[in-house]
Amino acid sequence: MSFFSWIYDQFSCDLAIDLGTANTLVYMSGRGIVISEPSIVALNKVTGKPEAVGVKAKEMLGKTPANIVAIRPMKDGVIADFDVTERMLEYFIEKAKEKKHLIRPRIVIGIPSGITQVEKRAVKDAAFRARAREVFLIEQAMSAAIGADLPILEPAGNMIVDIGGGTTDVAVISLGGIVYARSIKIAGNEMDEAIMQYIKKKYNLLVGERTSEQIKIQIGSAYPLPEPLYMEIKGRDLKDGIPKTIVINDTEIREALKAPIDAVIEVVKVTLENTPPELAADIVDRGIVLTGGGSMLKSLDVLLREETQLPIFLTEDPLSSVVSGAGKILEDLDLIKKVATY
C-alpha cells in the first residue's frame, strides 16, 4: 500500500447506501453495514428542522402534535421531497462516521430500475449536497444480485426479484449487464395499505401504518398455511369513534393481499416472457432468486414456485442484499465501472 493510499484510508470513509422507500441501509468501507433505519424524518413545521430521523421518527408515526409531522421523503423508490431527503441523507452519512474525516466520501447508491434521468439526477444532487465527493448509481436489482452472490459476470442467465418497500424490481442479468428488467411501484408499502383498506371496509375499523405492517409480518401470507394464524388488533371504530379490538386470521389477510401479490407475480411472468431463449434455459436450471423485505412474506416462494414451475430461492438476508451488493461494488473499482449507471 502506497503512502497516499494509507492517507486516503485514514481520512476518508466511502459509503454504500440503499436509499429505500421503507428503510435506509448504510455500508461503510472496511466495516460493513453500520446503519439500518426507517426512511422517515420527523419535521418541526415551525422551525423547519428535523426533530428525529430513522427509528425515533418511526416511533412518532401517528403520534405527533400539530407542530411536528412525520414524513417519508421517498415514495415508490424515488425522491418525493428533495429537501427532506437531503437532510435524511446528511444525517445518516454523519451518523455513519465515527470520527470526522477530512476527505469527503465516495458514495454508491442503489436505485430502482425504472426511474427517469430526472429522478437519477435528484438522487445524485441530494448525495452531493450531503457532502459526497463522488456518486455512483447502481440499479437495485443488479446490486441485490451481487449481494446474493449470483455469478453476474458469467455468460449465463440469472433472474432476481427484489421486493422492497416502494418498488418491486425484476431483472435478468448476464455478463455483468441487465438483459431485461421491469420495475413496478407495488411492494411492501402497497401490501400494508391493502391491509388497512381491507380492515376499514370489512370491520369499519381504522388502523395505522405500524399496526398494518405488524399484521403483515405476523399473520400475512401468500399461500394457505399448514396451521391457521390469528391476531388481536386494536384500532378506532369509524361508526362510534371509540377504540375497539377485533381478532383477524391469516385467510382474511391473504384475501387483502391478493391484488398486490398478483401484480408481483404478473411482473415476474412478463419478465420471463421477454427473456431470450438461451437465458430462459439457464433460469430453468438456476431458478429465481427472491430478495428484499417484501420477499419475507410467508409462503410467497411457494406461490411463485406454483405459478412459474421454476425453483425459487430466498436469499439468506433479504433486507440487506442491495446494500451488501453496493458495498462489494464500493470495494471493487473495476466492478463499479462495469455495473454503475450514470
Image (spheres, rainbow, N blue to C red):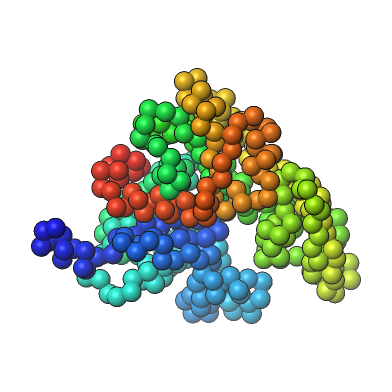
Residue 64 is left or right of residue 145, and the answer is right
Along the line of sight, the residue nearer the viewer: 226 or 5: 226
Where residue 197 appears, x then y in whole percent? 76, 55
Above-or-below relation of 58 to 76? below
State the residue in front, 10 or 70.
Answer: 10
Is 103 displayed left or right of 156 in the figure?
Answer: left
The x, y position of residue 225, in whole percent, is 76, 48
- Classify the position of the C terminus by image quarter: top left
In this picture, is 138 found above or below 98? above
Q: Judge whether residue 280 can be spotted in this image.
A: yes
Left or right for 242, reference 315: right
User: Which residue is situated farthest in the left direction here?
Assistant: 3
Residue visible at 50% across and 66% down in the picture: 37
Q: Residue furthest right?
A: 240
**Residue at the farthest top position:** 277
Residue at horizontal 60%, vertical 31%?
A: 310
Task: Give the left or right position of residue 19, taking residue 220 as reference.
Answer: left
Please tell me which residue is depicted at 51% across the width and 53% down the height of the picture: 317
Q: Position of residue 262 (x, y in %)?
A: 69, 39
The residue under the point 63% across, 54% down is: 189
Number of disc labels: 0
Question: Compared with residue 220, is residue 181 higher up or lower down, i.e. above or below?
Answer: above
* Residue 184: image location, x then y, percent: 57, 41
